[in-house]
Amino acid sequence: MKKKTISQIQKELWQLCRQVANKIYVSEDGLYRCYTCGKIIEGSNKQLGHFLPKSTCGAYLKYSLDNLRWQCYNCNINCGGQGAIFYKKLVEEKGQEYVDQIFLDRQKIIKAHDYFIQLCEEYKSMLE
């Protein structure tokens, strides 16, 4: 069997992230709300945003549910992720230690290909 390329694995992993996020980051009323502004989001306005931007968070956090929350297009793209608000809400929701750990995890060095395959399997099991 042909080994999947890193690009193929990342594409699959991103779709799994979205599916898991749909399952765990839905509000009590069954709607999806922007993590930073609170607006109801759906369709193409529903973006999976990174607390630490994917350009700087490293491979370990790029697909980590700890670093991802639903955001509207405006907050995620036009406002650059609303980092300060994202930070404040994460501290309120999960605590300062949680946020500090995300910053520490930014420094983790991993073998991306193997880790992404492992993460795919973990997320698939969460969806079962």
Image: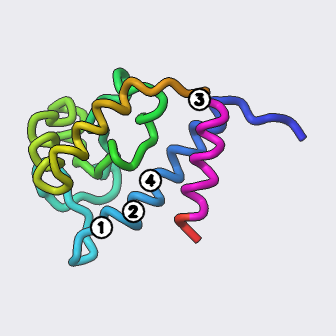
Upstream in sequence: badge 2 or badge 3: 2
Few, some or many residues within 10 Å of mark 2 (<14, 14–19, 20+): some
For the point 64% across and 38% down, which residue is it? 9
> How far apart are labels 1 and 2 at the CA level?
6 Å
View extreme (front): residue: 97
- The residue range painted magenta reads 112-125
For residue 97, above or below residue 82:
below
Residue 84: image location, x then y, percent: 10, 35
Q: Tell me the number on the disc at residue 26.
A: 1
For residue 39, above or below residue 76:
below
Disc 2 to disc 4: CB gap under 8 Å: yes
Disc 1 to disc 2: CB gap under 8 Å: yes
Label 3, secondary structure: give it.
helix
Residue 63: image location, x then y, percent: 45, 41
Upstream in sequence: badge 3 or badge 4: 4
Q: Is residue 92 left or right of residue 15?
A: left
Label 2 sits on residue: 22
For residue 79, above or below residue 88:
above
